[in-house]
Image (cartoon, grey):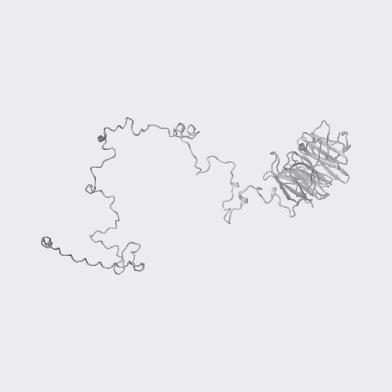
Amino acid sequence: MPTDTIFPAVPTPPPPPAAPPASPPPRDDELDDLPPLDGESPDEEGHAPELDEEPAGGDASLDDATGEDDPVDPAELDIDDGEGGWLEGTDDAEDLDMGETPLVELEAERDPMDDVEEPGVGDEDFGIGQDGERAELDSGEEGPAAEDEALREEDLPALDADEEGEVEDADLMDPGFASDEPLGLPWAAEPCARVGAPVGLAAATAVACATRGVIVAGRVEGVDAPALLRVDLEGTCERLAADGLDAARVRSIAVEGRVVAVVVEGGRVSVSRDGGATFDAVTARWTAADVALAGGALFVLASDGALLAAGAEPPYAFARCATTGAAAAMAIDAAASGPAPVLLVVDAAGKPASLDRARRGAPAESGAVGDVDARVPAVVAARAGHVAYAARRGGVARRDPAGAWSAHGWDGQVTALAFVDDDGTLLAATYSDVDDTTALVRLDAQGHAAVVARVGAARVVDGDSDGRALAMACDDAHGVVWIAGGFGVAAFATR
């Protein structure tokens, strides 16, 4: 059967019209103008609409509310009645055993420290909130709760101290701390130079001039046991045998030629006649405070103020020298008439009473003393008729050969004195506990005082060594002065 009879032919639809060609994307330089930053659209002439024009509808309002706070129409809410809470529908699972214990147990009262696992915290009592008392905390906004007696108005810097610039550091520090003028004295125009090769001494307790250099009782760096040493400007540090002597206990040394006399801790005197190789203890009933050698005689100042003298060769037959009273300090004056000890005699109250020039087997020559109280323990120096002693309140009291006394004060404690020439130039080793240093103060014959050198402790040894000078010796032959102390030993030029 012909197919065209059963299925009539379907006309073929015409092809769709071709799509217009896509326009190329606009270029950056062909973009439309951006709206103004203030959100207003200009009109066709480029003018923004006036704010007072009423909008269409007749309601003129500037309200920018979005209506999010308006009540919601329940008809607009799309709520599915089939959804419920997560606890709903439990009746559908009646065979599910939920247990008898509730899901959450809330305790009425619970100690917040029960869960603290750190030791010492849970049971520790901090004293907070006890007995229902309220702690009164002072925030400090109105100043301290009690008056501070140590704070005075005059201790504070002036309110206008920085009007002309920054506040000076000196206004914020105690006077004398890190000062350019130690002890309240200026530096000398020509300070004393430290001379000699370095000597490795950690600390020293006594020093005395010898034929070559000085003899020192001290401790060598890196060596525990103290020793008696011979030291010179070339750096020689020779250990003396010192048989029969405990060098660690030496407190004073005197040297004349090859005779060396020392006072050890406890007041015993030992004498060496071979330059320090061997020592023999002197048997006596007195306790020595100091020892000196002068003119072939051995002088001992006893702790009770008596002066005893004996020959420098054994047996040592000591005899008491005539004095006007108990002496507190002794120094050797190498006058033209011969070396002799000069004593600072004090009264029962410890105040200076007189100066005695003692001689072995002869009456003492007494002289008047200044009205300045002496430092205790007393320190005295004498040379060519000049005498000086350390003042109790700092500085020194000095007498010239004519007998005139003068007082010169400065800060610190004078611990050693020495005249370096016959003109009366005095050097005073003065210790300052503020910075733990010793300043060497030079007082000339005209009474001008200035600092010429400073030395401090290298380090603490056994907890008792510091920057304090314990002894001083003037070496006229080499023009130097030696000082010994917690810093070891040091030499400074005097001319």
Tell me residue 270's x, y (percent).
Answer: 82, 36
Left of 270 or right of it: where is 158? Answer: left
- Which of the 4 image quarters holds residue 91? top left
Please name the residue shown 24% across and 61% down the image.
56
| Outermost front residue | 1
- Residue 54 vs 254, above or below: the answer is below
Tell me residue 303's x, y (percent).
Answer: 79, 34
For residue 41, say whether it is visible. yes
Which one is nearer the viewer's eye here, 407 or 44?
44
Which one is nearer the viewer's eye here, 258 or 83?
83
Quarter of the image for the N terminus: give it. Answer: bottom left
Q: How many marks?
A: 0
Which one is nearer the viewer's eye here, 476 or 149?
476
Which one is nearer the viewer's eye here, 97 or 409?
97
Left of 261 or right of it: where is 145? Answer: left
| Outermost bottom residue | 45
- Which of the 4 image quarters holds residue 81? top left
- Residue 98 vs 431, above or below: the answer is above
- Residue 163 vs 211, above or below: the answer is below
Please name the residue shown 54% across and 39% down the image.
146
Tell me residue 243's x, y (percent).
Answer: 81, 36
Left of 373 or right of it: where is 178? Answer: left
For residue 366, say whether it is visible. no
- Which of the 4 image quarters holds residue 223? top right
Tell me residue 14's x, y (percent).
Answer: 19, 66
